Structures are given as structure tokens and as C-alpha cells.
Image: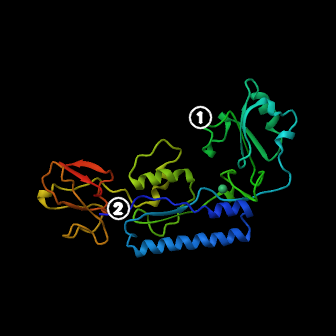
């Protein structure tokens, strides 16, 4: 049996065009149309391949895009009493965020001279950085950090990485597939929660993260109850959640069959479960009533 793996694909053309020409440009609008056609082709091929009943498809992006403002620029090197000789390490040329490591004993001084240097520049000590950014609580983030208001950045005609509450930083989220409710218009949510959703769909345990699956749970069909499958010698498979009963073939139409692991303690070698069933085990190997099932072959 061929298994279709779990895939993510990135269409980065829209990002690079937005940086180069700006989000409101004709070039960007043309590129949005091209990405839209590509998504349409993807869905068409999924349909033609008979994968729709088994495949969850998510279309999203990691950020929006803001037009860069070329006036009233922020020049850090011109700030009164600021000098790069007080700085041990700086990262200032990538997007609207700046990272600074002041030399020993210089943190308070650098912080005080930059703090009110420009009305569009926001300077924080690491421990005071707004929690809603989900950003500073990491060992890689420096003791001083700053960000600029939307539009205030040095390079490109379009940029992202600004305040996550800025409307132009919002992105899209569309999902379709057997796990998702149909026709649901969800409340806005933070993208930081998407990781937990992907882990849930793939049946893997998430690493520590800043999101919560509970935020996106309303998008999903109710979680299946634990498997209620009897020993194969009794030749019956029960289902919960109101699904139709398994046909005698053991597989719903359009579903993928899996065979019970013949290494199981059970001596039956041809018990078949329907992979899309809500009571199918979510882990790859699950013990239940002397049975061990594999998710695929
Ligand atoms: Zn980008």
C-alpha cells in the first residue's frame, strides 16, 4: 500500500514580490492571482486523485506585508549619546526588529539613550518586552531589543515583522478536509496556535511551544472516543460518534484499509480497520485487548 506522506509546501513568490515592489503594487496583485491559481490547481489534483476524504489541506502564511515609509527615518547612529563602541553585538539590518548586546556595565546607559530617541522606535529590556509578541522568552534573544512602528524599516518597498496587532500583519487561514468542520467562519486567532493543530492532525506530540490546541479545537470535528473494538475472534467492529457501520469489506468507500499487525498476540492475521474511522487509534502502535495495530503497511 502506498502511503502519502505529510507535506508542507511554501509558495514564497508572493513574499519576495511584496518586498521588492510593495504590497499595493500591480506586480504583487498579479502574483496573488498566480498563487490563487496554483492553490486551485492543487485542490483540483487532490480531487481528481480521490484524496479528498483522507487529506487535510491548510492554506495559510506566516505574515502580512506593510508598505515601507521612506520619510522620518530612524537613524540609530545619530541618536544623541549613543555610540556603537558601547555595543558588543548588534543585529540591526534585518526587518523592523533590532537586537543589541551592550558591553558589560553599559546596558542601563544604552537603554536610557535609546528609550525615547524616536517616537516610532520602541526599546525594551528583554524581560519587559510585551508578552503578546511571543518573542523574547528565548535564550537566543539579546538583553536589549527594539522594534519600529509599521512602515519604519530601512530596506525594500514592502516589509513584515511589525507589531502582530497591526492589521497589515494579519494573514489568512483556510482549511478543508475530514478533520475540519465545513463552512465554519472562525474567530481570529494567533498563528502561534497553528503548530499545536498540525501536531494534532499528524498524531505527534508537540515540543514546548507558545500556542494552544484549545484555541483551534472549535475548527475540528469533536475528538473521537477511545477505540471500542472487540477481539477479532468475535468478528465485530463497533464504532462511536455516529459513523455508519463498517461494511462487510471492513472499509468505508474511499477509505484506506490497514491490516492488523501479524506480530500481535492475537493469531488473526487479516483483521482490517478503516483508517478514517473516528475510533481508529491515533498513535502508530496501540495496545488494546491483546491487539496491536499498525497505522499503515
Ligand atoms: Zn519576507
What's the CA distance linking mark 2 and mark 1? 39 Å
Residue 30, percent from left and from top: 67, 72
From the Cβ of disc 2, is ligand 1 less than 8 Å away?
A: no
Residue 102, percent from left and from top: 74, 30
Local packing at callout 2 (Cα closer than 10 Å; few below 14, some 14-19, many 20+) is few
**Res 13 seen here:** yes
Q: Which mark is residue 3?
A: 2
Which residue, as the protein is rendered here, is positioned at the far top?
Answer: 105
State the residue position of label 1: 139
Q: Quadrant of residue 70?
A: bottom right
Which residue is drawn at the image coordinates 13% and 61% (left, top)?
A: 235
- Labels 2, 1: front one: 2
Which residue is drawn at the image coordinates 75% and 23% (left, top)?
A: 105
Q: Identify the image quadrant of the C terminus.
A: bottom left
Local packing at callout 1 (Cα closer than 10 Å; few below 14, some 14-19, many 20+) is few
Q: Which color mode does the image show?
A: rainbow
**Res 289 seen here:** no
In the rendered structure, are the residues bearing label 2 and label 1 in contact, judged by CB atoms less than 8 Å apart?
no
Front one among 26 and 251: 26
Residue 1, percent from left and from top: 29, 63
Considering the numbered disc 2 on the image, is that residue within a helix, a strand or a loop?
A: loop
Q: Look at the picture and state if 3 lies above or below 183.
A: above
Amino acid at each position: 500500500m502506498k502511503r502519502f506522506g505529510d507535506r508542507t509546501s511554501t509558495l514564497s513568490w508572493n513574499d519576495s514580490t511584496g518586498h521588492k515592489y510593495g504590497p499595493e503594487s500591480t506586480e504583487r496583485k498579479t502574483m496573488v492571482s498566480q498563487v490563487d491559481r496554483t492553490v486551485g490547481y492543487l485542490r483540483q489534483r487532490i480531487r481528481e486523485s480521490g484524496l479528498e476524504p483522507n487529506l487535510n489541506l491548510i492554506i495559510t502564511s506566516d505574515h502580512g506585508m506593510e508598505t515601507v515609509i521612506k520619510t522620518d527615518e530612524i537613524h540609530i547612529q545619530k541618536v544623541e549619546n549613543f555610540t556603537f563602541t558601547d555595543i558588543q553585538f548588534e543585529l540591526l539590518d534585518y526587518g523592523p526588529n533590532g537586537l543589541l548586546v551592550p558591553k558589560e556595565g553599559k546596558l542601563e546607559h544604552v537603554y536610557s539613550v535609546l528609550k525615547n530617541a524616536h517616537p516610532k522606535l520602541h526599546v525594551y529590556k528583554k524581560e519587559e518586552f510585551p508578552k503578546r509578541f511571543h518573542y523574547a522568552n528565548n535564550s537566543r534573544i539579546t538583553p536589549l531589543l527594539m522594534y519600529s512602528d509599521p512602515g519604519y524599516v530601512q530596506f525594500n518597498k514592502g516589509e513584515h515583522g511589525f507589531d502582530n496587532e497591526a492589521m497589515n500583519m494579519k494573514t489568512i487561514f483556510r482549511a478543508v478536509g475530514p478533520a475540519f468542520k465545513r463552512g465554519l467562519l472562525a474567530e481570529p486567532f494567533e498563528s502561534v496556535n497553528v503548530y499545536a493543530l498540525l501536531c494534532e492532525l499528524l498524531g505527534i506530540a508537540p515540543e514546548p511551544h507558545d500556542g494552544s490546541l484549545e484555541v483551534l479545537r472549535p475548527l475540528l470535528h469533536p475528538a473521537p472516543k477511545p477505540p471500542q473494538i472487540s477481539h477479532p475472534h468475535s468478528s465485530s467492529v463497533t464504532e462511536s460518534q455516529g459513523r455508519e457501520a463498517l461494511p462487510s469489506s471492513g472499509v468505508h468507500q474511499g477509505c484506506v484499509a490497514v491490516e492488523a499487525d501479524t506480530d500481535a498476540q492475537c493469531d488473526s492475521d487479516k483483521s482490517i480497520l478503516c483508517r478514517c474511522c473516528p475510533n481508529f487509534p491515533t498513535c502508530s502502535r496501540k495496545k488494546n485487548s491483546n491487539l496491536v495495530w499498525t497505522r499503515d503497511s
